[in-house]
Amino acid sequence: MTTKSYDELTKAYKSALNSNREMALEYSKAAYVVAQKEKDTFNIVYALYNLADVKSYLSKNVEALDDLAKAIEIAKQLNDTNVLYDLYNLKGIIATDMGEYLEALDAYIISKEYAILANNELSKTAASINIGFIKKLNHDYEESISIFKENLEIIDQMDLDSVKKNHNKRFLYINLSDAYLRMKELGAVEDDYIKEATYYNDLGLQISSKTKNTGQYYGFLINKAIIHFEKNEYEKSIKLATEIKEHALNTKDTVSLGTMYYYIGKNYHSQGKHEKAIENLEKFYEIIQKSQKKYSNEYQLHFLLALSYSEVGMRKKFYFHLNEHNRLQDEKEKESIKVVSDIHTKYDLPSMKDELEKIEKEYEKQEIRKKWLYGISGFLIIVLIGVFFFYKLKVKRIQKRVEAVLQKVVALENEQEAQKQEKDKTIATSSVSEKVTDEKAALLLEKLAEFEKQEEYLSVDCSLTFVAEKLASNTSYVSNVINNYKHKTFKVYITELRINTALIRLKNDEKLRSYTIKAIAEEFGFKRQETFSKAFKAQTGIYPSQYLKKLREDLEID
């Protein structure tokens, strides 16, 4: 190892990180020694970064933070914003593992500032995702899910190579699945959260490789084992959890190991096998006691141990774990309230201090600086007052959009009525032919008109291939005709037909209005509720729920 170069040692470290972390630690130590000998400041910083990273995996978080503190001091001399982003981002990750959520929040906010300075969109997105991760750990599940989904769309639109894009998407899929599984704590409908958790977990597994993306691959398997448990498929859950446990033992991944001991124990408890449950749950408790990480489900572990010891008649153990559960639950509830509050103060809301500093710098050379500051103070007061009226203004804007949509629906209905009143269908057909000189295109447009009349676009299987087969043509030609004569892409063409049909039918069909958004989406050819809502909003400026609310209100008035 002493004869290897810094680059060789770093490459070996990365290769060993997911398979043999003790060896990865040795490679990172050796790389640090080489970097110091060569007096290469940049390499010294990243050797310390790698040391901190692998130590965090080995539950040596205090040492990891010490290494990062050294790296940050050196990196500030380099004045490299990308390097400083990486260091503060890792600091946030380690602080999160230790349960130091407020310290993690501060680190993520600083990392985002460096990402902004570096004009690095991916890093800014990562900082936002990490804030969502903290929210998830502190029970703000709906907000964290919203953040994860928003950033999933952003990453999809980024011009990234497939490796980097899929890495980030896997991280989001894991957390979305996990957040939906945790929704049970808030009393979510079981079928809903399991379905969503399974959907995102399956998406992640589809783009994961056991050999190339080992850590994330096993993260998805952990979620899958939990999903089996939630479906009462206890034997499947135990079998998969045991497989993951063996991998965690080989790689010294104490986090995954503890989680699997917990769920194996939880499965046995649900089966009434309390001795086996205690055996596995105690192994998890032993990991917690030796670890510098903070496990978000420790209070739940004590509750399960209390129940299991009660079943086998060990009253002393029962009371110990019950008291620990109550103590930790109280601490967690208080801490979560504090963390969520600080996130809103420090991250969600605009920083008034930053705004004042910016304005102060802008006018510091002017003689009327004090007057400006007084004016800004007044402006901030007005802004604070304006917050109270924001909701009402927002409602008014939505109402105007809804009214505009209703006017559009009336226009669509009038257009349809006019078409129905045409006495001779051939007249309409000939009008198409007269406008289109290409006979083949004219014929296809006539077929498209019949396709629209029969509302075949409402089929969930309505793809370009589906339409081409219906029209006895090929996909390329159908796409070209729609582009040239309808002046829109095939996707936009089908979506507009579906949304316009939905607008009219919802207005006139009381029974349809009683359906769930999901059922309505399927009625008009959309496989997923989210896709329907997004398309509806893009075309009309409002969400389906807002349109339905207005229609129901009008019905009550009538």
Image (tube, rainbow, N blue to C red):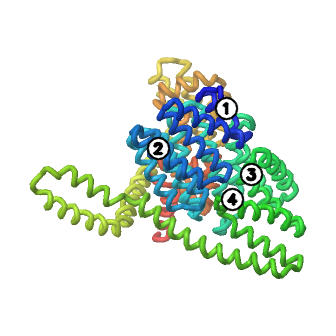
Local crowd at mark 3 within 10 Å, few (<14), some, or many (≥20)?
many
Cα–Cα gap, marks 1 and 2 = 24 Å
Tell me which amino acid carries mark 2: Tyr
Tell me which amino acid carries mark 3: Ile
Cα–Cα gap, marks 3 and 2 = 30 Å
Tell me which amino acid carries mark 4: Ser
Cα–Cα gap, marks 3 and 1 = 27 Å
Q: Are marks 2 and 4 in contact (CB under 8 Å)?
A: no
- Closer to the eye: label 4 or 3: 4
Q: Quadrant of residue 331?
A: bottom right
- Closer to the eye: label 3 or 1: 1
Per the rendering, the mark at residue 291 is 4
Figure label count: 4
Task: Give whichever of discs 4 and 1 has the lower sequence position.
Answer: 1
Q: Are marks 4 and 3 in contact (CB under 8 Å)?
A: no
Residue situated in front as seen by the camera: 52 or 433? 52
Q: Is residue 532 above or below residue 163?
A: below
Residue annotated with mark 3: 222
- Judge left or right: residue 136 versus residue 195: left
Q: Are marks 3 and 2 in contact (CB under 8 Å)?
A: no
Cα–Cα gap, marks 4 and 1 = 27 Å
Tell me which amino acid carries mark 1: Ala
Task: Give whichever of discs 4 and 3 has the lower sequence position.
Answer: 3
Residue annotated with mark 1: 12
Residue situated in front as seen by the camera: 151 or 131? 131
- Indicate the secondary structure of the residue bearing disc 1: helix
Q: Quadrant of residue 258?
A: bottom right
- Judge left or right: residue 262 versus residue 547: right
Per the rendering, the mark at residue 85 is 2
